[in-house]
Amino acid sequence: MKRLIMTTVLVITQLVGLSVSAQDLTYAEQHVPEVFDPIYGGETFGEERINNLMHSGLYGVDKHGQPQYVLAAAFPLYSEQGQVLEIELRDDLKWSDGKAVTTDDITYSWRLLSAKMGDYLPFLHDIQSIKAKPGHPNTIIVRLKQPNPEMDFHNYLIFPLLPQHVIGGYDYSEHDDYAASPVTIGRYKIKDISGNNLDLEAHFWPHERQTSDHVRNIRIMQFNAIDQIFIYFSRRTTNFILDIPNANLNAVLSEPENFGARDYAANMWSGIVLNNTHKLLSHPEARIALTMLFDRESAIKNRFQRKASLITGPFTNGSSFYDIDVLPYEFDEEGAREIFETLGCTWDTDGKINFEGEPVKLRFMKNKATMTTNVDVVLGQFSKTMKQLGFDIEHNDLSNEKIFINKISYKRNDYDLAFINVKYPQDLGVYDIFHSKGGSNMAQYEDAMTDELMEQLLRATNDNVRIDLGKKVHQRIHEKAPFIFLWAHNYTAGYNVRRLDNIDIDPSTIFNSVTTWKAIQ
């Protein structure tokens, strides 16, 4: 539910030396949230995953994008061409402090989230009002601003609930105590926080009738040493890892009596942000030429193999919006040079490229703290190719992930190129990056046609229309090349078959189905 997240984290597994019951899942994240709430929490993928375990809305979606009722008792009743929705709440809803969830909490959550997160969750503004049904204290009436004949209620009612009796007002900044140890309603709630350990216990599990062999307790450890993660998993001192390194995959698969594996493709891709306000890079042709200097096919073949697949735009290969007819820009140094020449670039006697009478300097920012060796190698080759063509490359390698995120999010003129991983839980998260008014428009990309297509996509309800619009968005952004689109990420989760069973990975949220996992006694 939280805002779009950008980072370069690879995620992870569990720690060693734990005494955990057979019902527990123990794994590690590089970052455990400093605040556990859906407004200010979740600056990294790991933090986002943890908050998703503790917060729920009236409805959700499964890994196939199909709606599910969660805190609601059933799907809505419609009237007035889908503009009015009547929703009954489950009668067993309680906050983690034991207080009952009320219809006032629903209205309060909508108003607070609209005020604080409206730019990230624009569908909240499509709701005109949420009120309790007179004489029915456990039922709400939701009125939308426009008729909704397709009745895609899950687009509007998946926002997480916040406790009015704890927070009270709308000046959220005064409630740091809530953010640090919140009252929540979700599948799990906080049991204990000590040192680098975060312990969660089962709270509210929708639909399923759980038994004692399900994962009812989760221990999450903060674990910074990425290179040691697989060692702990391979020694069977941990029972789960979110991504088995490619170099170790065959070793894991050779021990089916000890380990199991699940392949999944998260809605995550890697790319290089291009500062679209840079004098030269303000031209789409120049951005395409830079893309042609990156040998993506060789990088994937020689360095990533099954862990990556080439993409041509903002949607990954598994998305219905990905347009397979859009062909990638091929690696072509001479072709790139010709494009720069047509833009008026010249080269001095030292082979340095000039544009409008000035040498072209490109500041290339990377987050070294979370980069793998393979990524470092291919980015180094890309830098070498740019230098050979005459660019002056200034590297800015940051070692702190949160400083890196702050820079790419808020100091967008401090760099001209920045390597990032991008993830959004649903395809429509693309709005936040590529709309001219998007909250995470790191490239400072502005294109009226892209804006119009994305706005139509946000409002579309017919699946066929949405797919057509999504492909047009993909094609348009490919043509304008505000990023160098590199590859989508493919993952292989691993688990100890002696400890866990019935593992089902949701590519978008990873742990969306964790309440159906089985812990072996």
Image (spheres, rainbow, N blue to C red):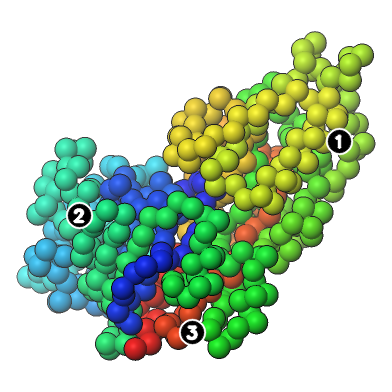
Q: Earlier in the sequence, mark 2 or mark 3?
A: 2
Q: Earlier in the sequence, mark 2 or mark 1?
A: 2
Q: Position of residue 69 (x, y in %)?
A: 32, 74
Provide the residue designation for mark 1. 336
Q: Secondary structure at mark 2?
A: loop
Which is nearer the eye, 317 or 65?
A: 317
Q: Secondary structure at mark 1?
A: helix
| Horizontal side, residue 368 vs residue 39: left or right | right
Asked if 503 appears above or below 489 in the picture, the reply is below
- Callout in the foreground (2, 1): 2
Q: Gap between marks 2 and 3, in whole Å?
A: 34 Å
Residue at (59, 33) in percent of width and height: 397
Q: Position of residue 362 (x, y in %)?
A: 69, 26
Which is nearer the eye, 61 or 36?
A: 36
Q: Secondary structure at mark 3?
A: loop
Q: Position of residue 478 (x, y in %)?
A: 71, 47
Residue extending farthest to the top is 357
Q: Identify the amino acid type marked 1.
A: Ala
Q: Quadrant of residue 307?
A: bottom right
Residue at (49, 32) in percent of width and height: 407
Provide the residue designation for mark 2. 182
